[in-house]
Image: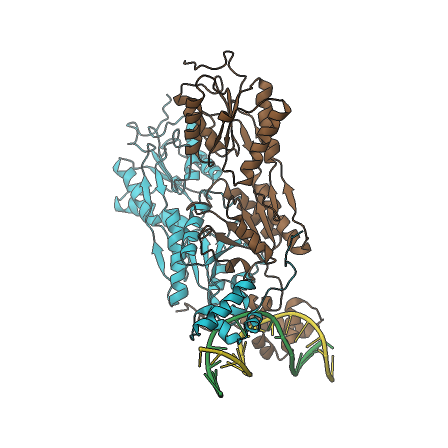
Chain colours: A cyan, B brown, C yellow, D green
Amino acid sequence: MMTGLMADKRRPTLQDIAREAGVSTATVSYVINNGPRDVRPDTKRKVLDVIHRLQYSPSSAARQMKGLPAHAFGVVLPHEVESVIGSPYFGPILDGVLRVARRDHKNAMLFTGATWMDEAFDFSPYVDGRTEGHVVIGASNGLERMLAIHSRGIPLVLINARYPLLSSVDTNNEECLYSLTCHLIELGHKRIAFLAGPPESTTAQERWTGFERAHRQYEILIDEDFVKVGNFHFQTGYERTVSLFLETKDNPPTALVAANDDMAMGAWKAAIEFGLSVPRDLSITGFDNTPQDFDNYPLTTVEQPLVEFGIQGADLLMQIVRERPQQPIEVTVPSRIVTRNSTAPPPKKSGGKTSQ
Amino acid sequence: MMTGLMADKRRPTLQDIAREAGVSTATVSYVINNGPRDVRPDTKRKVLDVIHRLQYSPSSAARQMKGLPAHAFGVVLPHEVESVIGSPYFGPILDGVLRVARRDHKNAMLFTGATWMDEAFDFSPYVDGRTEGHVVIGASNGLERMLAIHSRGIPLVLINARYPLLSSVDTNNEECLYSLTCHLIELGHKRIAFLAGPPESTTAQERWTGFERAHRQYEILIDEDFVKVGNFHFQTGYERTVSLFLETKDNPPTALVAANDDMAMGAWKAAIEFGLSVPRDLSITGFDNTPQDFDNYPLTTVEQPLVEFGIQGADLLMQIVRERPQQPIEVTVPSRIVTRNSTAPPPKKSGGKTSQ
DNA sequence: CTGAAAGCGCTAACAG
DNA sequence: CTGTTAGCGCTTTCAG
């Protein structure tokens, strides 16, 4: 039986090669690395033969001890969610990141956010030298942890988020929401509700700012009652919209801008329950272009270039590892507005439900 | 400006801690590792203080040099496909793998198959000691590379594949195809076509064996003309089925078993083009339960427990790392047959197309 | 062109 | 309980 083969034999070291080939360890090293010194061709040949025969390959740990690069970077997925990878959000970003990894012959080390928000968050895996830096995907809280890691001199890039002092790749949230809102205003809407994301999220903040700017630009006041704060999830979108309708019975909004798709769909559900037809009675917009039943719910929204996020993020990290800039670098990758049929001019009779 | 902070200061070493705390390096080591020797509480305290103050954390490379475990394993995705992660296949498996990684406080290092089938395949990343072993996800060719890695003493687990001498986690392919085929036979089918996968794939082989066994069991001969070999992709499913129909005009099959969903859907398309109604004129089965338009194409198929594959695969790897068994271990995770409406009894008049 | 040897940061003997 | 020290496998300087 030829199972296991030399499974128990200790793996050969550079010394073994040197001894076997009858040369010094230095020579073997020069052969392996093609430098920094030259080696006579026949010596080289001899060494390479032994290397192949003994199936030698150098220990990465020993190399790192000499200060050589780890040829790996971390991919931090700071989410407790079970099914994070299969999601239509992380998947494409990770794909982009891995494309760069492949291009640069780096390995990607995955860090899942088991203890992300725990008291006992363990920094060591992030700073123990196995990685040259990290990209952090879609973090919306706990970023002070990453700042701490950054302050230990570890290169870091945030993808789809912003944070003071940290480099990042994100989209033009503010701009997109500004455009979306202007679009509604130009259709004739003056009473536009807003479903905001959690205030601690910079993304949520930027989207709100875009909404606000459009109103300022057109000199339309934002009715306080029209602004509701959710947490990016369907359920809060639904609930806040129900409250909204109840509280503004006599003078309801004619359009609703949600800070993301899930909340927009929640709002849509609420609209249906209140007998409102979208877009005839209520225009709705979202953000993310996450897969939905767009046939039945043709939501106008914003599509983020997720794969591009991954590529640019990993690319930026590589640049930072190389150049060690003193100041953080912020890259903006513009998104694309996807127009479907959830927006229309406001109903002629402002207010009042219409059935049928 | 407080950017960068100590970004340029070299990271502290255990020696730094020892010096600063006025103790020996050994003592610091014992504090860090809670052993193997005890340290007087106040000394310990003092050391821990310095560690915190200097934000020390040990170098993983130096530790590995001492033969300590790497606390990481590789996840090999041997596919050249661009968008591999976002797929409904890899995503769930990876999720399962990561769940185990989290549980055991291991890091997962991703290896994408850039050079998987190249002449110049580079073994070093797989054997350089940064990982304690690898899980290989869904490889159907080039597995001799993995065997070579295994023979260097690196623990390895194949997920959703089998290969001689290698440990693996896979489903009961043979059994599932046997059941599916029996189901058709019991419905009254005697003329059943088979769309096989590539012969080098063990998965494809097992599925064929199940098909065969059902026929032997019921003493039905398999018509050679009814067996076509594809490559698991839609296109070959379509093309082989077109050939099949053309070649068996006078005595066509009443059912078709495809080795996977994509080919099954290709076959369905061909059936439609030939004016056949599924399942009235032709019953079809698939394998994988990959997301399709099941509303319009209610394919009876087999759902593999993908997340479970990941969990069991990573689990098995951990076990192998621990126990170093001499013999490979093969784990089977059973799949579930998903019955929809693509199968029915054969048409009364065997043969002949029916329109309308 | 090649060899000898120092030393990277750590752990765990060995010696108090 | 603590300190001193060898050595893990490699790269690279210093000597030939």
Question: How many numbered callouts?
Answer: 0
Q: Which residue is drawn at 50% across and 11% down?
A: B349
Q: Position of residue A339 (x, y in %)?
A: 31, 36
Q: Say which quarter of the image contains residue B249.
A: top left
Q: Nearer the viewer, residue A33 or A109?
A: A33
Q: Where is residue A260 in the image (x, y as percent from the top left)?
A: 41, 42
B100 relative to B325 in the view: left or right: left
Q: Position of residue B227 (x, y in %)?
A: 50, 28
Q: Is residue B303 above or below residue A159?
A: above
* Quadrant occupied by the N terminus of chain B: bottom left
Q: Nearer the viewer, residue B60 or A228?
A: B60
Q: Position of residue A72 (x, y in %)?
A: 48, 60
Q: Is residue A258 above or below residue B60?
A: above
Q: Which of A194 and B107 is in front in this view?
A: B107
* Quadrant occupied by the C terminus of chain B: top left
Q: Which residue is drawn at 57% across and 45% down?
A: B159
Furthest residue in direction front, as rendered: A42
- Let me know if residue B181 appears in the view: yes
Q: Residue at x 43, y 49 (%)?
A: A95
B136 relative to A289 in the view: left or right: right
- Let me know if residue B293 appears in the view: no
Q: Nearer the viewer, residue B257 or A123?
A: B257
Q: In this view, does B332 lie above or below A37?
A: above
